[in-house]
Image (cartoon, grey):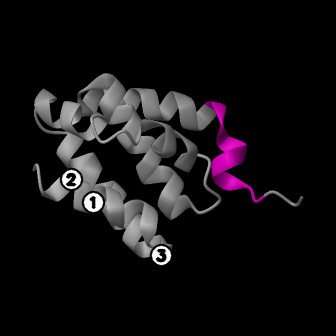
């Protein structure tokens, strides 16, 4: 993962393509869903702030996997992530279902 993760970081932030960014985020979600050391390696990339900001992205293909990555990192397990995800989505339903007219 030492060589893979820096390339992933570069793809996530240097290519302005929704599909590429979404796929990279889902890849990171899958990695974070593994062993604890994998979460640590993702955090060592120094991308936590940018991932949190991506949770507010206007495109659901970016905001949802970014949110899922944050949730998986915080909880460390899939079942807890699903419960946390449900609570946050319900409390922020406007962000995920309605477009901002402004």
**Which residue is pictured at 38% across the width and 72% down the height?**
20
Identify the secondary structure beneath mark 1.
Answer: helix
Q: Secondary structure at mark 3?
A: loop
Whether residues under marks 2 and 1 lie with C-beta atoms below 8 angstroms apart, the answer is yes
Which residue is label 2 attached to?
5
Secondary element at image label 2: helix
Please give left or right for residue 58 compared with residue 23 in the image.
right
Q: Which residues are magenta?
A: 91-99
Of marks 2 and 3, the one in the foreground: 2
Mark 2 crowd level (few <14, some 14–19, many ≥20, 10 Å Cα): some
- Separation of marks 1 and 3 at Cα, in angstroms: 14 Å
Query: Residue 94 location in percent, x, y?
Result: 72, 45
Residue in the foreground of this view, choosing between 79 and 47: 47
Q: CA distance from mark 2 to mark 1?
A: 5 Å
Residue occupying the point 63% across, 50% down: 96
Near mark 3 (Cα within 10 A), the count class, few <14, some 14-19 or many ≥20, is: few
The residue at which mark 1 appears reads as 8
Residue under the image location 44 percent in, 61 percent down: 13
Q: Is residue 4 left or right of residue 100?
A: left
Would you say the magenta stretch is mainly helix, strand or loop? Answer: helix
Q: Residue at x 50, y 73 (%)?
A: 16
Residue 77 in percent (x, y) is at 23, 28
- The quadrant of the picture occupied by the C terminus is bottom right
Give residue 17's mark: 3
Q: Per the image, is 2 magenta?
A: no
- Mark before the other along the chain sequence, 2 or 3: 2
Q: Position of residue 61 (x, y in %)?
A: 49, 63
Task: Indicate left or right for 100 with 45 as reference.
Answer: right
């Amino acid at each position: 993962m030492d060589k893979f993760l820096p390339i992933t970081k570069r793809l996530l932030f240097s290519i302005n393509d929704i599909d590429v960014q979404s796929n990279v985020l889902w890849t990171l979600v899958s990695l974070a869903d593994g062993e604890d050391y994998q979460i640590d390696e993702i955090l060592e990339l120094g991308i936590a702030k940018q991932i949190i900001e991506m949770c507010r992205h206007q495109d659901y293909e970016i905001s949802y996997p970014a949110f899922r990555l944050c949730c998986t990192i915080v909880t460390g397990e899939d079942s807890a992530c699903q419960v946390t995800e449900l609570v946050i989505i319900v409390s922020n339903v406007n962000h995920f279902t309605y477009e901002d007219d402004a």
